[in-house]
């Protein structure tokens, strides 16, 4: 099953379970973010990818320049373990990991979660690729991805069991747009898939196709 099919099934299931007013508020907030043009501010294909150094789930520092020394890098920004769409995406990427590696690339996923939450993500989803902790969204900011969750959405998230201040270690309610960047070994961004609608994600099989075409 494709990732988009899994996501569509999840959206349908959630739509049946969420109260109508909550579903409406979430839909309106998503539409407002899309209309804001936030995705247009993100790093574009052809641009040099900003370098970074972030800790993985085991606390080991991972540097983009070192990864690029081995070949292309697939860089995926996600919101957190609390986001079911992100979990579907990471699980789908894990299934595609063999093909991504065979194409000579390294896969890395980044969220603003604390190291503790990042470790839980890696454990619960059994990821075999690096999952990095970008507390404060400093790297996401370099890639032009950061937005602030609307105030009316904060109590809704809380009621759904999503405590962003705990998950991210701060109370600024900033999140990255869900996105995928394919960075060639010369540090040029070969492909950028950024969408302000967090339910839209790049198909892992498409990532492999882009890598094979580099």
Image (spheres, helix red, strand yellow):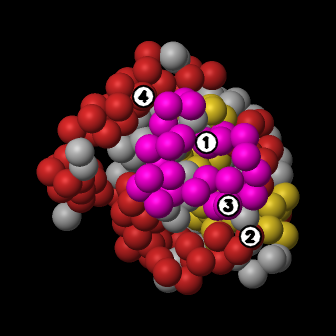
Query: Given this view, does label 3 or label 1 mark the residue nearer the observer?
Result: 3
Q: Secondary structure at mark 3?
A: helix
Q: CA distance from mark 3 to mark 1?
A: 16 Å
Residue position marked by numbered label 4 in the rendering: 29
Judge the density around disc 4: few (<14), some (14-19), many (≥20) Cα neighbours within 10 Å: some
Q: Secondary structure at mark 4?
A: helix
Going 35% across and 31% down the picture, which residue do you hit? Answer: 25
Q: Earlier in the sequence, mark 1 or mark 4?
A: 4
Residue position marked by numbered label 1 in the rendering: 176
Q: CA distance from mark 2 to mark 3?
A: 11 Å
The mark found on residue 115 in the picture is 2
For residue 25, above or below residue 122: above
Q: Is residue 105 left or right of residue 166?
A: left
If the image is split into quadrants, where does the N terminus sit? bottom left
Q: Is residue 16 left or right of residue 2?
A: left
Q: CA distance from mark 1 to mark 4?
A: 15 Å
Q: Quadrant of residue 22?
A: top left
Residue position marked by numbered label 3 in the rendering: 166
Residue 134 lies, in percent from the top left, at 74, 55
Going 48% across and 25% down the picture, which residue do you hit? Answer: 33
């Amino acid at each position: 099953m494709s990732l988009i099919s899994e996501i569509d099934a999840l959206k349908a299931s959630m739509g049946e379970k969420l109260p109508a007013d909550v579903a409406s508020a979430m839909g309106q907030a998503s539409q407002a973010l899309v209309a804001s043009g936030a995705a247009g501010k993100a790093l574009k294909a052809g641009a040099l990818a900003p370098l970074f150094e972030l800790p993985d789930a085991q606390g080991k520092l991972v540097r983009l320049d070192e990864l690029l020394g081995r070949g292309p890098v697939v860089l995926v920004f996600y919101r957190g373990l609390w986001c079911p769409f992100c979990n579907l995406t990471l699980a789908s990427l894990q299934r595609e990991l063999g093909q991504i590696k065979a194409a000579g690339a390294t896969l890395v996923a980044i969220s603003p979660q604390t190291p503790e939450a990042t470790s839980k993500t890696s454990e619960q989803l059994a990821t075999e690729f690096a999952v990095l902790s970008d507390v404060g969204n400093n790297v996401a900011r370099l890639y032009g991805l950061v937005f602030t969750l609307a105030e009316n959405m904060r109590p809704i998230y809380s009621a759904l069991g999503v405590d962003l201040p705990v998950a991210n270690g701060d109370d600024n309610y900033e999140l990255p747009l869900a996105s995928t960047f394919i960075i060639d070994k010369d540090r040029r961004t070969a492909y950028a898939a950024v969408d302000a609608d967090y339910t839209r994600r790049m198909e892992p099989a498409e990532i492999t196709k882009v890598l094979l075409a580099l």
